[in-house]
Image (cartoon, coloured by chain):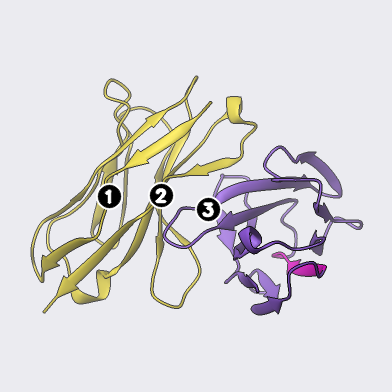
Chain colours: A yellow, B purple
Amino acid sequence: GDSVTQMEGPVTLSEEAFLTINCTYTATGYPSLFWYVQYPGEGLQLLLKATKADDKGSNKGFEATYRKETTSFHLEKGSVQVSDSAVYFCALSGRDGGFKTIFGAGTRLFVKA
Amino acid sequence: GAGVSQSPRYKVAKRGQDVALRCDPISGHVSLFWYQQALGQGPEFLTYFQNEAQLDKSGLPSDRFFAERPEGSVSTLKIQRTQQEDSAVYLCASKTNTGELFFGEGSRLTVL
């Protein structure tokens, strides 16, 4: 069945460092891909998405590109801030999975000043 | 309402008790999902409704778990004879037609 694998955390960075959180997926067909974020004490919320190959999703300085050839959707940000400290979840939703959204295990990011 | 509302936010149950968790989705969202999130893990799919129809319940871990959405709006997840392994955060989400999920803040269940 469909699945998502993302790098284990926690990831600890200094402010203004470059961030990459790796995500790969297994799915039949052409799923939509998502990054969700969970800030401390808050519910999950959508960060960005991409619906077809080579699409780039972007929001709040974060970017991820849908790479079908490598089945990846890595999250990147050029300069992280303390306020980016959160748990990040990679997810997919595809027709073959009945359109339910399947999540990775999450990667906790700590950004220190 | 403006967002997905879940209640109770926290529930402590003794092993063997029944619990009911409520979800009030965003008005007009026809799709509603329930997820279970264990500590340090990602959300795991439980079940999915489109309006009042339960289209997929493949993620429900046992027949002690039951979900309903009788009028296509508010949904209730019921867990009978709770066990310690049921301790988790139960998340409800409603979905737009562009695929984005809007989550509630979750109901944290602790079974003693």
Task: Give the quarter of the image for residue B89.
Answer: bottom right
Question: Could you tell me which chain the residue with mark 3 belongs to?
Answer: B
Question: Could you tell me which chain the residue with mark 2 belongs to?
Answer: A
Q: Is residue A101 magenta?
A: no
Q: Quadrant of the C terminus of chain A?
A: bottom left
Left or right of residue A44, residue A12 in this image:
left
Q: Residue at x 58, y 60 (%)?
A: B102
Q: Is residue B25 magenta?
A: yes
Mark 1 residue element: loop
Q: What's the amino acid at mark 3?
A: Pro
Question: Could you tell me which chain the residue with mark 1 belongs to?
Answer: A
From mark 3 to mark 2, how far is it between C-alphas? Answer: 8 Å
From mark 2 to mark 1, how far is it between C-alphas? Answer: 8 Å
Task: Tell me which label, 2 or 1, sits earlier in the chain.
Answer: 1
Whether discs 3 and 2 lie on one chain: the answer is no
Number of residues whose C-alpha sits closer than 10 Å to that of mark 3, classed few (under 14), some (14–19) or many (20 or more):
many
Left or right of residue A113, residue B12 in this image:
right
Query: Quick check: B22 above or below B53?
Result: below
Left or right of residue A47, residue A43 in this image:
right
Give the residues drawn in magenta, as a range.
Answer: B18-26
Mark 3 residue element: loop
User: Tags 3 and 1 in contact by the CB under 8 Å rule?
Assistant: no
Check residue B43 in the rendering and tell me which mark sits there, or answer none: 3
Identify the residue under disc 2. Answer: A105
Number of residues whose C-alpha sits closer than 10 Å to that of mark 1, classed few (under 14), some (14–19) or many (20 or more):
few
Residue A40 % position (x, y): 39, 75
Q: Residue furthest right?
A: B70
Residue B45 % position (x, y): 61, 46
User: Tags 2 and 1 in contact by the CB under 8 Å rule?
Assistant: yes
